[in-house]
Image (cartoon, helix red, strand yellow):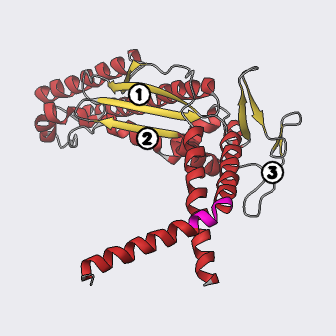
Amino acid sequence: MLNTKEKKMQNEEINFRELWATIWAGKFIIISITIIFAILSVLFALSKPNIYKASVILTPASSEGGTGGLAALAGKFGGLASMAGINLGAGGTDKTKLALEIIKSRSFLERFISKHNLLVPLMAATNWDLATGTLIIDDKIYDKVNKKWLREVKAPKTPEPSLWEAYNVFSDLLFIDYDKKAAIIVIDIEYLSPTLAQQWLEWLIEDVNSYMSEQDFDEAQASINYLNDKLKGIKISAMETVFYQLIEEQTKNMMLISVKPEYVLKTIDPPQVPEEKAKPQRGLIVILGTMLGGMLSVLFVLMRKKRMQ
Protein backbone atom coordinates (compact mmCIF):
# COMPACT_ATOMS: atom_id res chain seq x y z
CA MET A 1 0.00 0.00 0.00
CA LEU A 2 1.11 3.56 -0.69
CA ASN A 3 1.84 5.84 2.21
CA THR A 4 0.39 9.35 2.50
CA LYS A 5 3.39 11.07 0.92
CA GLU A 6 3.39 8.76 -2.08
CA LYS A 7 -0.36 9.27 -2.59
CA LYS A 8 0.11 13.01 -2.50
CA MET A 9 2.88 12.87 -5.11
CA GLN A 10 0.76 10.62 -7.31
CA ASN A 11 -2.20 13.00 -7.10
CA GLU A 12 0.02 15.95 -7.99
CA GLU A 13 1.38 14.04 -10.98
CA ILE A 14 -2.14 13.25 -12.14
CA ASN A 15 -3.21 16.90 -11.73
CA PHE A 16 -0.18 18.08 -13.69
CA ARG A 17 -0.94 15.59 -16.48
CA GLU A 18 -4.56 16.77 -16.61
CA LEU A 19 -3.44 20.39 -16.69
CA TRP A 20 -0.99 19.74 -19.50
CA ALA A 21 -3.57 17.71 -21.41
CA THR A 22 -6.05 20.59 -21.17
CA ILE A 23 -3.49 23.11 -22.37
CA TRP A 24 -2.39 20.84 -25.21
CA ALA A 25 -5.98 20.29 -26.29
CA GLY A 26 -6.48 24.03 -26.50
CA LYS A 27 -3.14 24.78 -28.11
CA PHE A 28 -4.68 26.23 -31.26
CA ILE A 29 -6.78 28.66 -29.22
CA ILE A 30 -3.72 29.63 -27.17
CA ILE A 31 -1.59 30.16 -30.27
CA SER A 32 -4.33 32.14 -32.02
CA ILE A 33 -4.97 34.48 -29.07
CA THR A 34 -1.24 34.95 -28.50
CA ILE A 35 -0.70 35.85 -32.15
CA ILE A 36 -3.59 38.32 -32.04
CA PHE A 37 -2.11 40.00 -28.95
CA ALA A 38 1.33 40.07 -30.58
CA ILE A 39 -0.07 41.76 -33.69
CA LEU A 40 -2.03 44.26 -31.60
CA SER A 41 1.11 44.97 -29.55
CA VAL A 42 3.11 45.65 -32.70
CA LEU A 43 0.41 47.99 -34.04
CA PHE A 44 0.19 49.79 -30.69
CA ALA A 45 3.96 50.16 -30.43
CA LEU A 46 4.19 51.52 -33.97
CA SER A 47 1.36 53.99 -33.33
CA LYS A 48 3.27 55.64 -30.47
CA PRO A 49 5.39 58.60 -31.61
CA ASN A 50 9.07 58.88 -30.73
CA ILE A 51 9.85 60.92 -27.64
CA TYR A 52 13.25 62.62 -27.34
CA LYS A 53 14.90 63.75 -24.12
CA ALA A 54 17.13 66.80 -23.81
CA SER A 55 19.16 67.12 -20.60
CA VAL A 56 21.19 69.83 -18.92
CA ILE A 57 23.57 69.49 -15.97
CA LEU A 58 23.76 72.48 -13.65
CA THR A 59 25.35 73.52 -10.39
CA PRO A 60 24.43 76.29 -7.96
CA ALA A 61 26.14 79.52 -8.99
CA SER A 62 28.55 80.94 -6.40
CA SER A 63 26.96 83.71 -4.39
CA GLU A 64 29.43 86.56 -4.27
CA GLY A 65 28.37 89.53 -2.24
CA GLY A 66 25.49 87.86 -0.44
CA THR A 67 21.99 86.88 -1.43
CA GLY A 68 20.64 90.31 -2.19
CA GLY A 69 18.21 92.49 -0.25
CA LEU A 70 18.22 93.41 3.42
CA ALA A 71 18.26 89.75 4.45
CA ALA A 72 21.77 89.38 3.01
CA LEU A 73 23.08 92.11 5.29
CA ALA A 74 21.53 90.89 8.51
CA GLY A 75 24.54 88.88 9.65
CA LYS A 76 27.05 91.65 8.97
CA PHE A 77 25.20 94.79 10.02
CA GLY A 78 22.12 93.56 11.86
CA GLY A 79 23.31 94.53 15.32
CA LEU A 80 24.35 98.05 14.37
CA ALA A 81 21.26 98.68 12.29
CA SER A 82 19.00 97.56 15.10
CA MET A 83 20.41 100.41 17.20
CA ALA A 84 18.76 102.76 14.72
CA GLY A 85 15.50 100.86 14.92
CA ILE A 86 15.96 99.01 11.61
CA ASN A 87 15.28 95.30 11.32
CA LEU A 88 17.27 93.75 8.46
CA GLY A 89 15.57 90.38 8.82
CA ALA A 90 16.93 86.83 9.08
CA GLY A 91 19.59 85.13 6.96
CA GLY A 92 19.29 84.42 3.25
CA THR A 93 17.31 81.63 1.66
CA ASP A 94 18.55 78.68 -0.36
CA LYS A 95 18.35 80.30 -3.79
CA THR A 96 19.06 77.08 -5.67
CA LYS A 97 16.13 75.28 -4.07
CA LEU A 98 13.98 78.37 -4.55
CA ALA A 99 14.88 78.52 -8.26
CA LEU A 100 13.95 74.87 -8.77
CA GLU A 101 10.62 75.40 -7.03
CA ILE A 102 9.98 78.44 -9.24
CA ILE A 103 10.70 76.36 -12.36
CA LYS A 104 7.97 73.92 -11.31
CA SER A 105 5.50 76.61 -10.23
CA ARG A 106 2.32 77.22 -12.17
CA SER A 107 2.74 81.00 -12.48
CA PHE A 108 6.28 80.77 -13.84
CA LEU A 109 5.47 78.00 -16.36
CA GLU A 110 2.34 79.77 -17.56
CA ARG A 111 4.40 82.91 -18.24
CA PHE A 112 7.05 80.75 -19.91
CA ILE A 113 4.48 79.10 -22.21
CA SER A 114 2.91 82.44 -23.10
CA LYS A 115 6.27 84.21 -23.67
CA HIS A 116 7.60 81.56 -26.06
CA ASN A 117 4.28 80.74 -27.80
CA LEU A 118 4.25 77.07 -26.79
CA LEU A 119 0.49 76.59 -26.71
CA VAL A 120 0.20 75.05 -30.20
CA PRO A 121 3.24 72.73 -29.90
CA LEU A 122 2.05 71.53 -26.49
CA MET A 123 -1.65 71.08 -27.21
CA ALA A 124 -1.96 70.31 -30.94
CA ALA A 125 1.22 68.51 -32.05
CA THR A 126 0.97 64.77 -32.67
CA ASN A 127 4.37 63.86 -34.13
CA TRP A 128 7.69 65.11 -35.50
CA ASP A 129 8.72 64.88 -39.15
CA LEU A 130 12.45 64.07 -39.13
CA ALA A 131 12.77 64.64 -42.89
CA THR A 132 11.53 68.24 -42.81
CA GLY A 133 12.30 69.00 -39.17
CA THR A 134 8.77 70.21 -38.49
CA LEU A 135 5.99 69.38 -36.08
CA ILE A 136 2.93 67.57 -37.34
CA ILE A 137 -0.13 69.46 -36.12
CA ASP A 138 -3.53 67.79 -35.82
CA ASP A 139 -5.74 69.83 -38.16
CA LYS A 140 -8.80 68.73 -36.19
CA ILE A 141 -7.42 70.58 -33.18
CA TYR A 142 -5.72 73.60 -34.74
CA ASP A 143 -6.03 75.26 -38.15
CA LYS A 144 -2.51 76.48 -39.00
CA VAL A 145 -3.65 78.46 -42.05
CA ASN A 146 -6.25 80.56 -40.22
CA LYS A 147 -4.52 80.21 -36.82
CA LYS A 148 -7.73 79.05 -35.20
CA TRP A 149 -8.42 76.42 -32.56
CA LEU A 150 -10.94 73.78 -33.66
CA ARG A 151 -10.88 71.22 -30.86
CA GLU A 152 -14.22 70.02 -29.53
CA VAL A 153 -14.49 70.20 -25.76
CA LYS A 154 -17.19 70.42 -23.14
CA ALA A 155 -17.75 73.54 -21.03
CA PRO A 156 -16.15 75.12 -19.11
CA LYS A 157 -13.25 74.34 -21.47
CA THR A 158 -12.97 76.35 -24.68
CA PRO A 159 -11.61 75.41 -28.13
CA GLU A 160 -8.45 77.37 -27.32
CA PRO A 161 -6.67 75.59 -24.45
CA SER A 162 -6.09 77.57 -21.29
CA LEU A 163 -2.64 78.20 -19.86
CA TRP A 164 -3.68 75.96 -16.96
CA GLU A 165 -4.14 73.03 -19.37
CA ALA A 166 -0.84 73.80 -21.08
CA TYR A 167 0.90 74.00 -17.68
CA ASN A 168 -0.34 70.50 -16.79
CA VAL A 169 0.94 69.12 -20.09
CA PHE A 170 4.32 70.84 -19.80
CA SER A 171 4.73 69.66 -16.20
CA ASP A 172 4.50 66.07 -17.43
CA LEU A 173 7.41 66.75 -19.84
CA LEU A 174 9.67 68.30 -17.20
CA PHE A 175 11.88 66.30 -14.82
CA ILE A 176 14.19 67.76 -12.15
CA ASP A 177 16.74 65.87 -10.04
CA TYR A 178 18.73 67.79 -7.41
CA ASP A 179 21.60 66.13 -5.55
CA LYS A 180 22.23 68.70 -2.85
CA LYS A 181 25.24 66.85 -1.42
CA ALA A 182 27.04 66.76 -4.76
CA ALA A 183 25.65 70.19 -5.77
CA ILE A 184 24.48 68.75 -9.11
CA ILE A 185 21.15 69.47 -10.78
CA VAL A 186 19.86 67.54 -13.79
CA ILE A 187 16.87 68.90 -15.69
CA ASP A 188 15.25 66.93 -18.52
CA ILE A 189 12.56 67.80 -21.03
CA GLU A 190 10.93 65.03 -23.04
CA TYR A 191 9.11 65.97 -26.22
CA LEU A 192 8.18 64.88 -29.75
CA SER A 193 10.81 67.16 -31.28
CA PRO A 194 14.49 66.76 -30.32
CA THR A 195 15.19 70.32 -31.52
CA LEU A 196 12.40 71.90 -29.51
CA ALA A 197 13.23 69.85 -26.40
CA GLN A 198 16.75 71.30 -26.47
CA GLN A 199 15.51 74.83 -27.24
CA TRP A 200 12.90 74.81 -24.48
CA LEU A 201 15.47 73.64 -21.96
CA GLU A 202 17.82 76.49 -22.89
CA TRP A 203 15.00 79.01 -22.58
CA LEU A 204 13.94 77.55 -19.24
CA ILE A 205 17.39 78.02 -17.66
CA GLU A 206 17.77 81.51 -19.14
CA ASP A 207 14.34 82.58 -17.93
CA VAL A 208 14.69 81.34 -14.35
CA ASN A 209 18.11 83.00 -14.00
CA SER A 210 16.69 86.21 -15.43
CA TYR A 211 13.63 86.02 -13.19
CA MET A 212 15.69 85.49 -10.04
CA SER A 213 18.19 88.25 -10.90
CA GLU A 214 15.40 90.74 -11.63
CA GLN A 215 13.74 89.92 -8.32
CA ASP A 216 16.97 90.43 -6.37
CA PHE A 217 17.88 93.57 -8.33
CA ASP A 218 14.51 95.12 -7.53
CA GLU A 219 14.85 94.07 -3.90
CA ALA A 220 18.32 95.60 -3.66
CA GLN A 221 17.08 98.85 -5.23
CA ALA A 222 14.14 98.94 -2.80
CA SER A 223 16.58 98.39 0.07
CA ILE A 224 18.75 101.31 -1.08
CA ASN A 225 15.70 103.56 -1.34
CA TYR A 226 14.62 102.48 2.12
CA LEU A 227 18.06 103.13 3.61
CA ASN A 228 18.34 106.55 1.94
CA ASP A 229 14.97 107.49 3.38
CA LYS A 230 15.99 106.36 6.89
CA LEU A 231 19.33 108.14 6.52
CA LYS A 232 17.56 111.50 6.47
CA GLY A 233 16.53 111.06 10.11
CA ILE A 234 19.94 109.94 11.40
CA LYS A 235 21.91 112.62 13.26
CA ILE A 236 24.67 110.43 14.73
CA SER A 237 27.77 110.31 12.52
CA ALA A 238 28.62 106.73 13.54
CA MET A 239 25.20 105.52 12.44
CA GLU A 240 25.50 107.45 9.19
CA THR A 241 28.67 105.48 8.48
CA VAL A 242 26.78 102.22 9.05
CA PHE A 243 24.03 103.29 6.67
CA TYR A 244 26.51 104.26 3.98
CA GLN A 245 28.11 100.83 4.37
CA LEU A 246 24.71 99.21 3.99
CA ILE A 247 23.99 101.22 0.84
CA GLU A 248 27.45 100.40 -0.53
CA GLU A 249 26.88 96.69 0.05
CA GLN A 250 23.56 96.77 -1.72
CA THR A 251 25.03 98.72 -4.63
CA LYS A 252 27.71 96.05 -4.91
CA ASN A 253 25.00 93.39 -4.97
CA MET A 254 23.23 95.21 -7.80
CA MET A 255 26.45 95.34 -9.80
CA LEU A 256 27.09 91.61 -9.32
CA ILE A 257 23.52 90.79 -10.33
CA SER A 258 23.89 92.84 -13.53
CA VAL A 259 27.09 91.11 -14.70
CA LYS A 260 26.07 87.49 -13.96
CA PRO A 261 23.77 86.02 -16.65
CA GLU A 262 23.84 82.63 -14.88
CA TYR A 263 22.80 84.20 -11.63
CA VAL A 264 21.49 81.17 -9.70
CA LEU A 265 21.99 78.10 -11.90
CA LYS A 266 25.33 77.67 -13.66
CA THR A 267 25.56 75.32 -16.64
CA ILE A 268 28.09 72.48 -16.51
CA ASP A 269 26.89 70.53 -19.53
CA PRO A 270 24.53 72.48 -21.84
CA PRO A 271 21.53 70.79 -23.45
CA GLN A 272 22.20 69.07 -26.77
CA VAL A 273 19.79 68.03 -29.51
CA PRO A 274 19.23 64.31 -28.81
CA GLU A 275 19.91 62.01 -31.74
CA GLU A 276 18.20 58.92 -30.30
CA LYS A 277 14.71 58.55 -28.94
CA ALA A 278 14.18 58.05 -25.22
CA LYS A 279 10.91 56.18 -25.64
CA PRO A 280 8.75 54.28 -26.43
CA GLN A 281 10.57 50.97 -26.02
CA ARG A 282 8.69 49.23 -28.78
CA GLY A 283 10.43 45.87 -28.41
CA LEU A 284 9.48 45.72 -24.72
CA ILE A 285 5.89 46.67 -25.53
CA VAL A 286 5.63 43.82 -28.04
CA ILE A 287 7.21 41.27 -25.66
CA LEU A 288 4.95 42.25 -22.74
CA GLY A 289 1.86 42.32 -24.97
CA THR A 290 2.64 38.86 -26.37
CA MET A 291 3.28 37.43 -22.89
CA LEU A 292 -0.01 38.91 -21.69
CA GLY A 293 -1.82 37.30 -24.60
CA GLY A 294 -0.23 33.92 -23.84
CA MET A 295 -1.20 34.05 -20.16
CA LEU A 296 -4.76 35.16 -20.88
CA SER A 297 -5.21 32.48 -23.53
CA VAL A 298 -4.05 29.74 -21.14
CA LEU A 299 -6.40 31.09 -18.47
CA PHE A 300 -9.26 31.12 -20.99
CA VAL A 301 -8.63 27.47 -21.98
CA LEU A 302 -8.51 26.34 -18.34
CA MET A 303 -11.71 28.21 -17.40
CA ARG A 304 -13.53 26.82 -20.44
CA LYS A 305 -12.50 23.28 -19.47
CA LYS A 306 -13.75 23.83 -15.93
CA ARG A 307 -17.14 25.06 -17.15
CA MET A 308 -17.51 22.03 -19.42
CA GLN A 309 -16.96 19.57 -16.56
Callout 3 touching callout 2 (CB < 8 Å):
no
Q: Is residue 154 left or right of residue 231?
A: right
Q: Does the segment drawn in magenta span residue 63?
A: no
Q: Which mark is residue 102?
A: 2
Q: Is residue 11 above or below residue 253?
A: below
Q: Looking at the rendering, in which quadrant would you find the N terminus? A: bottom left
Q: Which residue is denoted by mark 1 in the rendering?
A: 213
Q: Which mark is residue 151?
A: 3
- Of residue 131 and residue 295, the one placed in the foreground of this image is 295
Residue at the farthest right position: 146
| Magenta highlight: main SS | helix
Q: Looking at the rendering, in which quadrant would you find the C terminus? A: bottom right
Q: To which quarter of the image does residue 129 belong?
A: top right
Q: Residue at x 57, y 65 (%)?
A: 23
Amino acid type at mark 1: Ser
Q: Residues within 10 Å of mark 2 (few under 14, many from 20)?
A: some
